[in-house]
Amino acid sequence: MTPSVTIVECPRDAWQGLRRIISTEEKISYLSGLISLGFRHIDAVSFVSPKHVPQMADSESVMQRISQAKSPSGDAPDIIGIVVNAQGLERAVAAPGVTTIGYPYSISAYFRRANANMSRAESRALVERIQRDTKAAGRKLVVYISMAFGNPYDEPWGPEIVEDTLIWLKDVGVRTISLADTVGTASPESVAHLFRAVKDCVAGVEIGVHLHSRPDRAAEKVLAAYEAGCRRFDGALTGLGGCPFAGDALVGNIPTETVLATLAARGVSTGIDARSLAVACAMTGELREKYAEPSSHDSKPASASTSKPN
């Protein structure tokens, strides 16, 4: 059965905040395992400065080893590599097996300057270059709109700002966009309201969500997005990883198993069966037990080169 939604598994997002470094061999084994279990879309690596994100220093080595991996159906998976600047773009395009380039575009001026040291014009020029280079290289592009659901900086925000950004992104050729709740404060109601407000302004563009949540509200947010028309969801198995910007240790990536269970209750086909999900959760649990520390959420807000799209 063809999945009626796109599920993006995000180990890169889950791992990059861990203080202990996962070995290259373990990353390769884990990612290969996800692919063999039928995970079709994986946010696997980022091409950023090892000085800022040592967890991602081996992205090229990882991709060299998993670039030939195939799903049970024999198809190559969609592997996303995140970039935050031109140097990262060049590395990502050169890496084997990276099929989609991801870029976080912030609509918050404060966050963009503090996190990427870029003006709006500079960030937009980079998006245009990324679009040109990925198209020339035969790769796809997903742009994450950071702070899409508001910001804590008392800056202007509203659906009209998100809509203007979506229209501009479509105009420069972007066809996949994910709305990111960077600080994890969106309510189910605000998720639904924003998605309904903007979903029809860019016909032909796939719009997804990358949400953070406290565990007790995760399912509500997923359901709100789905019922508002969203058909692309990011998640991280067992909810590993979090949002250091939120100031709440319980706010983290929405667990993939919550996404799948919530959608299954609505009769939605995700392409990931119960057995595969159970094996993937067990694999993730082993990594979590070995590498995750209780204090991992207490780290300082990351710089631009942490490559967090959310």
Image (cartoon, rainbow, N blue to C red):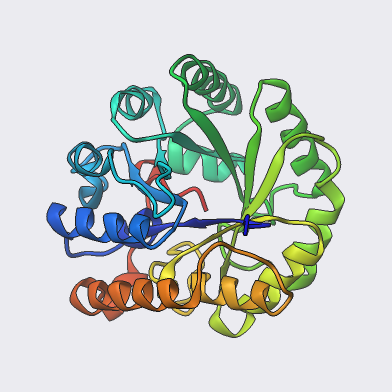
Q: Tell me the quarter of the picture where residue 52 sits.
A: top left
Residue toward you, 226 or 187: 226
Query: Residue 78's image quarter?
Result: top left
Q: Residue at x 74, y 64 (%)?
A: 226
For residue 301, say whether it is visible: no
Please state which of residues 149 and 33 is positioned toward the viewer in this rendering: 33
Residue at (57% x, 19% y) in the render: 128
Residue located at (13% from left, 55% from top):
25
Q: Position of residue 222 (x, y in %)?
A: 67, 69
User: What residue sits 55% from the left and 22% below the top?
Assistant: 131
**Is 81 in front, or is 114?**
81
| Left or right relative to 237: residue 195 | right
Q: In the rendered image of this protein, does residue 188 appear above or below residue 129?
A: below
Image-based side of 272 in relation to 222, left or right: left
Residue 50 shown left or right of residue 284 in the figure: left
Residue 20: give x, y in percent of width and height: 17, 64
